Amino acid sequence: MASNPKVSVRDLRTWYGPKQVHRGFSFDVMPHEILGVIGPAQSGKTTLLRAINRTLEFTAGSRMTGEILVDGDDVHQVDDVYGLRRKIGMVAPLPVGLPLSIYDNVAFAPRAAGMNGRSNLDHLVERCLRQAALWEEVKDRLDSLGTKLSGGQQQRLTIARALSHSPEILCLDEFSIAIDPVTTMRIEDVLKELRREMTIILVTNLVQQARRLADRTLFLWNGEMVEIGATEVIFGDSPKDRRTADYVNGIFG
Amino acid sequence: MNSTERSTSSAVPRFVETEFVRKKQRAEWIARGFFAFMAASIVVPLLLILGYIIVHGAPAISWEFLTENPRSGGAKGGIWAAIVGTIYIVAISLAVSAPIGVLAAVYLNEYAKENWFNRVVNLAVVNLAGVPSIVHGLFGVGAFVYFANFNQGRKSILAAALTLAVMTLPVIIASTKEALAAVPRSFREACWNVGATRWQTIWKIVLPNSISGILTGVILQVSRTAGETAPVMLTGVATWKSLQDSGWFLYHPIKDQCMALSMHLYYVATQANNVPEAVPYAIATVLVGLVLLVNATAIGFRVYLRSRKKW
């Protein structure tokens, strides 16, 4: 029995000013799957994520038509956009340690949502840092600045922060772009654990990363969805579209 | 290593000082020296100004000069009333312009969308900054002395302070916007992504990390407010208003006009008779000293806040 999609994108078209980004496509993301999104730069991968959690509207001149449903609710109709954003964890390409202590970095979102009480927060901070595989390295210096951590540690801190509001969907936007391969592998292991609890949308420039992790893969090119399918098919001998095969085999892109 | 060794070494010499390299290096030295000279030339007028007024004015500065009211048309006594008047005007003016300017800048930088309203406000800020101070003075006469009419159609300290507040507002807005814009946008996006409102983002992240720049911009306006003569002369500063008239210590900010160092300097330097030559320089020294004192405090504060900077 097919369950309801976690995220549904319907005929998505977006613009920054006169420049069109997405040219109209639809797809679903199923619960507890890892959807890999691959495609060259400027193909609209980041904008897709920004449309889902409605941060696209922070960019002056951006427009969007079509529908995005999260758990069946149109993101533009929800009463509480902040609640919507908390349902979606977002990890940006470059690690962003907020200029706060490690503890406060992770406790920022729960506090912004009205949670307080030291023991609750303590518990939550530890859980998120453990999930992000950072706890052992920072547990003795939670009061030091998040911005002073190394790049790889900051990226895991960013992931811990994205987990701190207990999201049901985790969006990662080229999370490994600024970190070393060993840390990348550690985070990939974390993601394999997390998929039991949440749905993951993994935007990546590294096609092999999608191949390693994704259940299904979506190939985005120039704002068009060239193909979406099971990862084995996309990376197999005969994806539907010739361009997909060329891209994943490194012939262009 | 001598030249014979170098010529006999078997490896291909990789770093040869060709004529081209020498030319490049010469151009580099000339450019650097020229720019350094230009930078140094900024220091010269400052030192000359400070040196000149201090050398001429210092002999006239004494405890009595600072704490006594002027007498005999400024020829005798001190400048106490003018010091108090300047402090009044600066304090009231900044108390008005700093909150309005900072909050307006927060709106413009953090909330305003790119639309006609925002463009009109930004245009107004830029143009207000370009209005000559004497025009601000005339505006102040119309708006604060007559229209707002604090003091039955007469000049008042409040009118002068508000005139200067209007004058400093655009600069405070501009410097605050700059300080806010220096906080990386990625910080804001990280906050929005986890469901924080704009206000939560501003309060927890943006303001704590831009406060040193904001305060610096505000405090730098002290020197401008303290030095202006034309607008306050028209709106609230008298040539002669010793403090005895309203008690030993205080002016009434609404019912009184006041003296001010800038105006008093102009008066004793050009209008008064029998003034000892050193007195105008002494007044200038005190005015510059007051401003430098405030700026030094600001710089110290800035250094302190910078040391706590978190990225």
Image: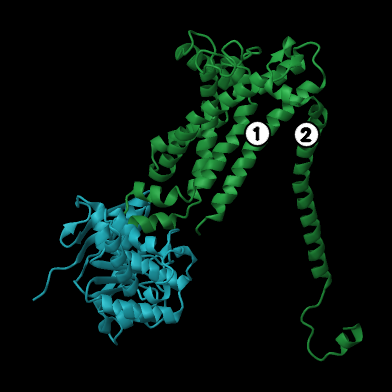
**Residue at horizontal 27 percent and vertical 54 percent from the top:** A113
Q: Can residue A178 be seen by looking at this rendering?
A: no
Say the numbered circle drawn on residue B291.
1
Frontmost of labels 2 and 1 is 1
Q: How many marks?
A: 2
- Please state the chain letter of the residue tagged with numbered disc 2 in the rendered image: B
**Residue at horizontal 78 percent and vertical 87 percent from the top:** B12
Give the spatial CA distance, label 2 vs label 1. 14 Å
Q: Is residue B244 above or below residue B18?
A: above
Give A146 or A154, whichever is nearer the viewer: A146
Q: Is residue B220 above or below residue B65?
A: below
Residue B263 picture location, percent across and down: 67, 19
In the picture, which chain is cyan? A
Within 10 Å of the Cα at label 1, are there few (<14), some (14-19), or many (20+) other Cα atoms?
Answer: many
Residue A206 picture location, percent across and down: 39, 77
Q: Colour of chain B?
A: green
Left or right of A79 on screen, residue B250: right
Give B299 or B48, whichever is nearer the viewer: B299
- Please state the chain letter of the residue tagged with numbered disc 1 in the rendered image: B
Within 10 Å of the Cα at label 2, are there few (<14), some (14-19), or many (20+) other Cα atoms?
Answer: few
